[in-house]
Amino acid sequence: NDERRRAAIRVIESLEKEGFEAYLVGGCVRDYVLKKTPQDYDVATSARPEQVEAIFAHTVPTGIKHGTVTVLQDQTSVEVTTFRIESDYQDHRRPGRVKFVSSLKQDLARRDFTINAMAQDRHGRIYDYFSGIEDLNDKKVRTVGNPVERFHEDPLRMVRAARFVAQFDFELDKQTELALLKCKQQCVYLSVERVTAELEKMWKARRASKGIGILFTCGLIYSLPPFNNWKIQDVPGPDQLAPMDWTDDRIIRWAYLLFCCGVSSDNAQSRLREFRLSNTDIAAITSCFRLGAEWKSLTETTAKRLLLTEGLTNVLKASGLAKLLRRLPADVFLDKQLQKWWDEMPVTQVRELDISGKELVEHCQQPAGPWVKKTLAYLLEKVALGQLPNQKNVLLKEGCYFGANHSQ
Ligand code: ATP
Ligand code: MG
């Protein structure tokens, strides 16, 4: 991390050598004051994007329209953005145009919250025009300037306010909170992708329940895509949301959110699709949701059967969710027991069996059909539970016997 900071400082030095101004800005300055490790280092400069590209040997035009060039420096990358303000917010989504400006202060003034609107020069000096340090000390999330105007410009800032509260366990400043209540309906203009990205950041936050709580209590969620067409019946109170903070697993947190919104097992998958998550994520969250909701206490045999059909990862996530739903304390014992049972099984997948479907069909002299898959699943369970050895001749004999009775 120190390495990345040094790389960013070196970028600043190179820009200054060419006569430009350059500073660390945004999250990395906030995190420096909080003594936390930043996600990434952002640099703001008076140099135009073309000038930045000309100064450094290795650059990527990441967001050249918005003035951002990624500089590859010392094995890491630094985002360098020209001082700018945003204009043309008419579509309520992203600024249509950006305008480059000459002063750091103007650049800082367009940023969302005071805690995110500080800069730091390469000597460590902090530029704090909007009382960001004071708000950090007071643990307050406050917009730079008039919150109603700032939320109108970009409604995502309302969701971001909730996210920063969750991330740092802060509170909303009073005026900022009132503006949120007033502007909440503007959220209908947001794209699902931007909402999903903020939720993903929420799942990394220590007090996710606090951020989600704000979405409910301030009423944002009823206007926020995709929740705004869900007809959410009961508003979860802080007590119902609290267990969300007992895990840091994003899959379990997604599943728990669905519960808080009153989604049923049958609807989980289609609801998740609305967030445009990847198919892998949708499958993992759906499985966690379904198994977690129907969780029953397990014996060795029922646990092993479940492990065979669902896989260890899914079962562990579901047990994690079940704990939250039952408000049980983190149960390391059960996770260890599940892992032990998993490790104990000599086979966990059909392809590990000493026979294939083809061999089964040939040996049993029965035409291939659904019985083959059923028989293999049956044999897998027998071998996994230690009731049959994983030996070709034994499996063929038992398989044909079973297959003959289940050929319909
Ligand atoms: P994190 O540590 O989670 O990355 P961050 O503060 O770096 O938090 P980013 O979303 O990476 O947040 O944005 C970087 C900076 O850009 C912010 O600190 C803020 O100054 C500014 N910013 C980002 N999004 C907005 C927005 N919608 N409106 C105004 N300023 C924004
Ligand atoms: Mg960032």
Image: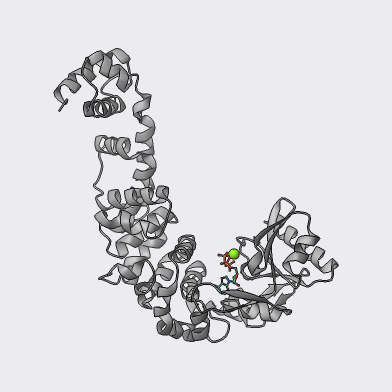
Quadrant location of residue 363?
top left
Q: Is residue 168 left or right of residue 243?
A: right
- Give coordinates of residue 342: x percent, y percent: 36, 34
In this rendering, is residue 44 above or below 396?
below
Query: Residue 395, can we see it?
Result: no
Q: Residue at x 56, y 77 (%)?
A: 113
Q: Residue at x 79, y 61 (%)?
A: 54
In this rendering, is residue 293 above or below 43?
above
- Give coordinates of residue 50: x percent, y percent: 75, 65
Quadrant location of residue 335?
top left
- Give coordinates of residue 202: x percent, y percent: 46, 64
Query: Residue 236, can we see it?
Result: yes
* Between 312 and 98, the one nearer to me in the picture: 98
Quarter holding the N terminus?
Answer: bottom right
Q: Residue at x 77, y 68 (%)?
A: 122
Q: Is residue 328 left or right of residue 39?
A: left
Snapshot colouring = one colour
